[in-house]
């Protein structure tokens, strides 16, 4: 970890990387913008997977005094991970043939048929306890009439994966056991909320002649203002919806795995402890004797003893970790490996053939309807997850290492 603190900064920037050369220029500029904000508490943090985002770097963490910043949470509010291990050894199922290929191929195919991908939706509304609760508490939301249709619309998306870097993976841990990991968020709900409140914050900041420059794209809302409270209500709704969305997909995936294993082996599947955690959100926490709004954008909370999930890239490794409660990082770690290439840059640099051959050589079954953009999420487009982990050993202890054996992508 090193610290940036010079004439460009009002507050220090602590970076969990070897040196400044490891930061892309746009990411560094965004970090300096954050370090100029007057309401920052202590310092700005950049995790080892950091790269440029919209307004605030992905892998960025700030603690803010009495304000929330929509773009410091991001458009996929509540995006995060869901993980569960099983008692099934991969060696016991790997070579089993079914009517739809081997066991992993059959599982991947069944998941693709059960879970809507990309912009797909369910044809009928799904059950959602989160949205039902929102309808019972409409006084929290009714002043933002433009957003209200999102609640009814959400019933058709809960339990759906989305696209981009979201995935459902079947994995093998270091002891040879089958595990399941899901990466997804709040779908269209989170993006609409972020865009709506960023626009509102921008209008207010311009009216207030705020010293936060408009080009920073970090317009804020005071938490005690009506608009700030409205954002917090909608943000929490999106977080709860994202949590439920992942849990719903995990239930479906577990049922598919359980059914196929029972049918072809007679074994009973037992599932271990589930870990469902966010990595795009803001929360009121106490750090260095102050109650502050910690914004984690592409960053995972890891309090001492807390379990979390840090995924790598498609076909790479992922980790389950235990937090060490590092105070300097506001009890935070990276949320993944972090990109080396933009999506468009990856598609220019790596061919479809190269990615598909690489996955085949690793024995990874890919479930993806269209392969034309497969390079966007290939492992070559991301940083080496083991190098990222090496930079944050003061934050977490790895307790489970996982290798992709099958993956469903949008």
Image (spheres, rainbow, N blue to C red):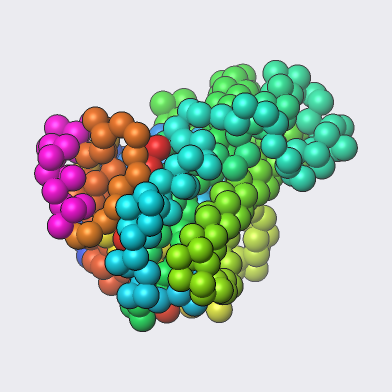
Relative height, residue 82 to residue 194 (above, below): below
Residues shaded magenta: 344-361
* Percent coordinates x, y for residue 100 in the rendering: 37, 49
**Can see residue 395?**
no
Residue 108 in sight here: yes
Q: How many marks?
A: 0
379 or 322: nearer the eye?
A: 379
Q: Residue at x 86, y 32 (%)?
A: 139
Q: Quadrant of residue 405?
A: bottom left
Magenta span: chief secondary structure: helix
Quadrant of image for the N terminus: bottom left
Reply yes or no: does residue 83 show up in magenta.
no
Residue 323 in percent (x, y) is at 49, 74
Q: Quadrant of the C terminus?
A: top left
Name the residue: 48% across, 54% down: 182
Residue 91, how many percent across, how many down?
A: 33, 75
Q: Is residue 94 left or right of residue 71?
A: left
Place of residue 354 in the rendered image (x, y in percent of width and height, measured from the top left)? 12, 44
Quadrant of the rendered image containing residue 344: top left
Q: Which residue is pictured at 62% across the width and 49% down the height?
A: 248
Residue at the (52%, 41%) spot, across then down: 115
**In the image, is 282 to the left or to the right of 342?**
right
Which residue reaches farthest front? 99
Residue 354, magenta (yes or no): yes
Q: Is residue 170 above or below residue 409?
A: below
């Amino acid at each position: 970890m090193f610290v940036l603190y010079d004439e460009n900064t009002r507050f220090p920037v602590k970076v969990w990387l070897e040196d400044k050369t490891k930061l892309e220029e746009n990411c560094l500029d965004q970090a300096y913008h954050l370090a100029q904000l007057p309401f920052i508490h202590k310092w700005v943090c950049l995790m080892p997977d950091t790269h440029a985002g919209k307004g605030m770097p992905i892998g960025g963490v700030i603690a803010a005094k009495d304000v929330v910043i929509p773009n410091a949470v991001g458009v996929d509010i509540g995006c995060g991970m869901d993980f569960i291990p099983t008692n099934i050894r991969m060696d016991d199922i790997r070579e089993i043939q079914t009517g739809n290929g081997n066991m992993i191929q059959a599982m991947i195919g069944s998941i693709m048929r059960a879970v809507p991908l990309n912009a797909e939706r369910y044809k009928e509304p799904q059950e959602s306890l989160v949205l039902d609760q929102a309808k019972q508490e409409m006084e929290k939301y009714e002043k933002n009439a433009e957003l209200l249709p999102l609640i009814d619309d959400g019933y058709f998306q809960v339990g759906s994966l989305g696209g981009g870097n979201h995935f459902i993976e079947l994995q093998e841990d270091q002891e040879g056991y089958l595990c399941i990991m899901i990466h997804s968020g709040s779908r269209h709900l989170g993006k609409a909320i972020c865009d709506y409140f960023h626009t509102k914050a921008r209008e207010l900041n311009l009216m207030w002649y705020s010293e936060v420059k408009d080009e920073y794209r970090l317009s804020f809302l005071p938490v005690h203002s009506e608009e700030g409270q409205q954002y917090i209500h909608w943000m929490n709704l999106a977080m709860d919806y994202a949590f439920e969305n992942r849990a719903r997909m995990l239930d479906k995936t577990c049922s598919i795995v359980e059914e196929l294993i029972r049918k072809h082996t007679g074994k009973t599947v037992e599932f271990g402890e589930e870990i469902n955690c966010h990595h795009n959100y803001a929360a009121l926490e106490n750090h260095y004797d102050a109650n502050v709004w910690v914004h984690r954008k592409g960053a995972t909370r890891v309090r001492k003893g807390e379990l979390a999930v840090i995924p790598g890239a498609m076909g790479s490794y992922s980790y389950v970790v235990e937090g060490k409660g590092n105070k300097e990082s506001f009890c935070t770690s990276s949320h993944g490996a972090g990109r080396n290439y933009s999506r468009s840059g990856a598609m220019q640099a790596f061919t479809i053939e190269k990615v598909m051959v690489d996955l085949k050589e690793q024995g990874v079954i890919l479930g993806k309807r269209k392969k034309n953009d497969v390079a966007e999420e290939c492992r070559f487009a991301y940083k080496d997850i083991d190098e990222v982990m090496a930079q944050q050993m003061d934050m977490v202890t790895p307790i489970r290492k996982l290798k992709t054996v099958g993956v469903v992508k949008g």
